[in-house]
């Protein structure tokens, strides 16, 4: 069998006369140098993704990938000896060609086709949340202030209702807070609240909450030494492409913030496949693209390989494209000027092979055939080769509902994420304070007492000027209460963690 230790067999390259040239491998020690799989619809990208995922899993490397069409779920079932698979195996000299199933954990934001996967609003951070909401610059500024208020005052932002409650407070106290944090426009607050309602209607409330996903649960290795393949059911999620892209970007940022530096390990700690990668960059602000490029560049030293899967190499910005060392290019069509440019761009990114013209070959590749260039030697890209991709060992095509449920029931994370936990957070705290303030106002009005001097938010005693009846927000604190809360936060920080945010706004652990 054409397999070597420390390598993943990808396929066999061919000479111009179609004879077998040599075996093509992805070297595991360069697996964290990232990669790119591109090609038009129907050219074999999904099968290539499955082959790479199986190879990493067999080498003991955990894998995370999104299943856009449902086909990737087949990796959880044993493949079947079909004629076209056996023919391809014979063509590339894959002998013996063995079929097997791989350890899979199914995930689903909606909890229908896998274990529920969630993040808290606090973990998401203002930058990614603004991206999800397509917020304006002014609205993003208000979101940043909201997170600062929550972080500094110990208000846990777990789900959408927590953020709504905090925004209500900010709208009610806009003039007071503006003097401390800068202009808070009530119209911007209202726009954000309307955007949150839209997100809720699109199903985003399924994503925000607890228990939040632990990174360690997508980095598991099975008892037989295979890396667990985490498959995210994304067929329904793709109906909200911005949520899909933001979720995967959040997960990437969590990996970046949580994992320690390991340099260049002998094999990756995790490989992350980002399918439909163009959704990540479409209409993304420049600052976000710059930070994505920074994360992709730096996460390599944490042992994480990121592989972008998309139809067109032009979908990925040049600054990110330059970081992707392992490349598989399936066929592209060249009917329009943009497609012709894409073909030329793809051809120019490869180390040339004098045996053929890359730009011409890209448009004539067959299904399951690709131009392949992997890092080799001291990390330099290999000469590009026209390659027949090996057939996978798992099933090509989706598992049945019964098979999927059996995998879910036997999962190592069964029962950990399926039930929603709604602990005390910003919504409950702010609601209780608003109710108490309203009760105090009513009591003062009934007794005929009203404070006659002005106060600042958070200071003043019982003679503090009452707020309007029914107002949502914090109860104004006495100096003693503020000092006690400050001391409590100091102690909590010392025994817990400081609320510090990283490159993409995610909480640092």
Image: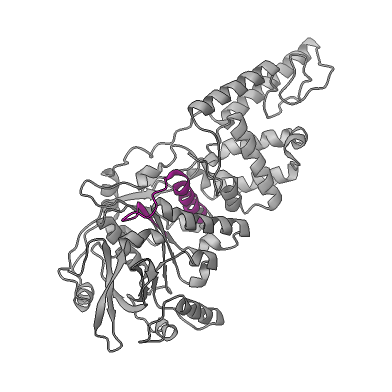
Q: Among all residues in the image, which is located at the extreme left?
A: 96
| Of 145 and 425, the residue lying toward us | 145
Quarter of the view holding residue 231 = bottom left
Which residue occupies 64% across, 39% down?
Answer: 146
Horizontal placement of 413 versus 236: left or right?
A: left
Q: Which residues are magenta?
A: 245-273
Residue 212 sits above or below residue 492 on the image? below
Quarter of the view holding residue 387 = bottom left
Horizontal placement of 175 versus 25: left or right?
A: right
Where does the image place residue 452, in percent across and percent down from the top left? Answer: 84, 17
| Of 418 and 452, the residue lying toward us | 452
Q: What colour scheme has been applied to the protein in the rendered image? A: one colour
Residue 253 on the magenta span: yes
Which residue occupies 61% across, 56% down?
Answer: 287
Where does the image place residue 297, in percent across and percent down from the top left? Answer: 48, 58
Residue 188 on the magenta span: no
Residue 410 sits above or below residue 301 on the image? above
Where does the image place residue 483, in percent across and percent down from the top left? Answer: 65, 19
Where does the image place residue 453, in percent across and percent down from the top left? Answer: 84, 18
Residue 345 sits above or below residue 207 on the image? below
| Of 476 and 70, the residue lying toward us | 476
Horizontal placement of 269 versus 145: left or right?
A: left
Q: Among all residues in the image, which is located at the extreme top?
A: 447
Q: Among all residues in the image, which is located at the extreme bottom?
A: 17
Horizontal placement of 163 versus 88: left or right?
A: right
Which residue occupies 58% across, 31% down?
Answer: 155
User: Which quarter of the figure is the N terminus placed in?
Assistant: bottom left
Residue 27 sits above or below residue 266 on the image? below
Q: Among all residues in the image, which is located at the extreme right?
A: 452
């Amino acid at each position: 069998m054409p397999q070597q230790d420390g390598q993943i067999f990808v396929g066999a390259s061919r000479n111009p006369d179609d004879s077998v040239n040599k075996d093509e491998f992805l070297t595991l020690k360069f697996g964290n140098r990232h990669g790119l799989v591109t090609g038009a619809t129907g050219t074999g990208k999904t099968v290539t993704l499955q082959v790479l995922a199986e190879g990493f899993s067999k080498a003991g490397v955990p894998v995370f990938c999104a299943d856009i069409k449902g086909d990737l779920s087949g990796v959880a079932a044993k493949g079947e000896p079909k004629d076209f698979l056996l023919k391809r195996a014979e063509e590339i000299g894959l002998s013996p060609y063995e079929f097997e199933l791989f350890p899979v954990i199914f995930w689903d934001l909606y909890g229908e086709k896998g274990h529920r996967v969630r993040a808290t609003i606090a973990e998401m951070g203002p930058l990614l949340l603004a991206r999800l909401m397509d917020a304006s610059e002014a609205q993003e500024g208000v979101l940043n202030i909201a997170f600062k208020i929550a972080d500094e005052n110990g208000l846990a932002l777990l789900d959408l209702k927590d953020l709504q409650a905090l925004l209500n407070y900010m709208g009610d106290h806009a003039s007071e807070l503006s003097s401390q944090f800068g202009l808070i426009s009530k119209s911007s607050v209202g726009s954000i609240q309307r955007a949150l309602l839209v997100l809720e209607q699109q199903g985003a409330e399924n994503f925000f909450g607890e228990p939040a996903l632990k990174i360690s649960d997508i980095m598991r290795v099975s008892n037989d030494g295979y890396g667990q393949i985490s498959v995210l059911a994304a067929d329904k999620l793709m109906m909200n492409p911005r949520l899909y892209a933001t979720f995967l970007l959040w997960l990437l940022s969590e990996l970046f913030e949580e994992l320690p530096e390991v340099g260049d390990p002998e094999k990756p700690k995790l490989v992350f496949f980002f399918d439909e990668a163009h959704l990540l960059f479409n209409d993304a602000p420049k600052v976000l693209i710059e930070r994505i490029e920074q994360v992709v560049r730096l996460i390599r030293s944490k042992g994480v390989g990121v592989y972008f899967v998309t139809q067109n190499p032009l979908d990925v910005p040049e600054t990110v494209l330059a970081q992707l060392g392992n490349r598989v290019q399936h066929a592209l069509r060249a009917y329009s000027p943009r497609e012709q440019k894409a073909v030329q761009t793809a051809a120019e990114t490869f180390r040339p092979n004098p045996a053929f013209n890359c730009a011409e070959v890209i448009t004539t590749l067959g299904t399951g055939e690709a131009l392949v260039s992997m890092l080799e030697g001291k990390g330099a890209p290999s000469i590009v080769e026209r390659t027949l991709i090996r057939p996978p060992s798992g099933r090509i095509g989706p598992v049945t509902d019964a098979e999927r449920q059996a995998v879910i029931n036997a999962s190592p994370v069964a029962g950990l994420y399926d039930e929603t936990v709604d602990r005390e957070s910003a919504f409950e705290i702010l609601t209780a304070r608003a109710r108490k303030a309203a009760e105090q106002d009513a009591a003062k009005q009934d007794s005929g007492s009203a404070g006659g001097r002005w106060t600042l938010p958070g200071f003043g005693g019982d003679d503090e000027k009452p707020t309007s009846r029914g107002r949502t927000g914090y109860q104004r604190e006495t100096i003693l209460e503020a000092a006690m809360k400050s001391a409590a936060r100091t102690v909590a920080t010392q025994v817990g963690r400081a609320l510090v945010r990283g490159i993409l706004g995610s909480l640092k652990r």
